Amino acid sequence: MPDIPRTVLLKPLVKNPQIEIGEYTYYDDPFHAEEFEHRNVLYNFGPEKLVIGRYCALAEGVRFIMSGANHNMSGVSTFPFTIFGGIWAEKTLDIALGAPSRGDTVVGNDVWIGYQALIMPGVRIGDGAIIAAGSVVVADVPAYAVVGGNPGKVLRKRYSDEEIAVLERIAWWDWPVEKVTEHVRVIMAGTVEELAAVAEG
């Protein structure tokens, strides 16, 4: 970004087809901002995708562990013999391919993930959620929840269930950027009621 070299919009930078990034989602890192898909998405060997929505804020050191990191636990040893090739691979490929997967890792829209948070494979993070710095997220996160700790736990909800339903229905992140720009103050500092009035107006 102009004048902020440590902050990059990810959509134009990420080339891996297994990583889908929405518009205006950014990553902040003073040293490796442009290396997100290689340094921050780890063990991306399988068919699973990382999908991140629009308008997300990812702090320095956020890491996504993908399902390729999982070792098969169906037998006595968890050692990944298959990856070393040769006769080991021939004898164990079916075992490696049969390892369970939690599926794609999905981050909603308008999600803030704090410094050095770790997101484990197959986790789904709802719209508007906040992940505290240093958290290890091992389970799905509801929309507009604040999660922290290791393992990550819901600390509180940002809004009532009724307000969350309204926010999910409004889905301001899907508005044309011109409408976002026109109402950016309400989006950033307004109430749910004020945003609903804009959406209905």
Image (tube, grey):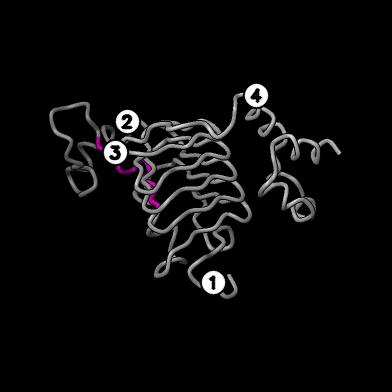
Camera-nearest label, 2 or 1: 1
At 20% from the left and 37% from the top, the residue drawn is 91
Q: Residues within 10 Å of mark 2 (few under 14, many from 20)?
A: few
- Looking at the picture, tell me which residue is in the foreground, 92 or 8: 8
Q: CA distance from mark 2 to mark 4?
A: 42 Å
Q: Nearer the viewer, mark 2 or mark 3?
A: 3
- Precedes in sequence: disc 1 or disc 3: 1
Residue 39 or residue 135, whichever sits in front: 135
The residue carrying mark 1 is 4
| Residue assigned mark 3 | 70
Q: Tell me the distance, in whole angstroms, between the alpha carbons under discs 2 and 1.
A: 45 Å
**Circle 4 is placed at which residue position?**
162
Amino acid carrying label 1: it is: Ile
Label 1 Cα neighbours within 10 Å, binned few <14 / some 14-19 / many ≥20: few
Looking at the image, residue 155 sits to the left or right of residue 112; the answer is: left
Which residue range is magenta in the image? 62-71
As shown in the figure, which amino acid type bears the numbered disc 2?
Gly
Q: Earlier in the sequence, mark 2 or mark 3?
A: 3
Give the alpha-carbon distance from disc 4 to disc 1, as whole Å. Answer: 38 Å
- Which circle, 4 or 3, is nearer the viewer? 4
* Disc number lying in front (4 or 1): 4
**Which numbered disc covers residue 98?**
2
Question: Which of labels 1 and 3 is toward the front?
Answer: 1
> Which-is-in-front pick, marks 2 and 4?
4
Residue 82 coordinates in the image, percent (x, y):
22, 43
Q: Give the amino acid type for the residue marked by disc 4 in the picture.
A: Glu
Q: Amino acid at mark 3?
A: Asn
Residue depicted at x 56% and y 50%: 56
Sequence-wise, the earlier of marks 4 and 3 is: 3
Q: Earlier in the sequence, mark 2 or mark 1?
A: 1
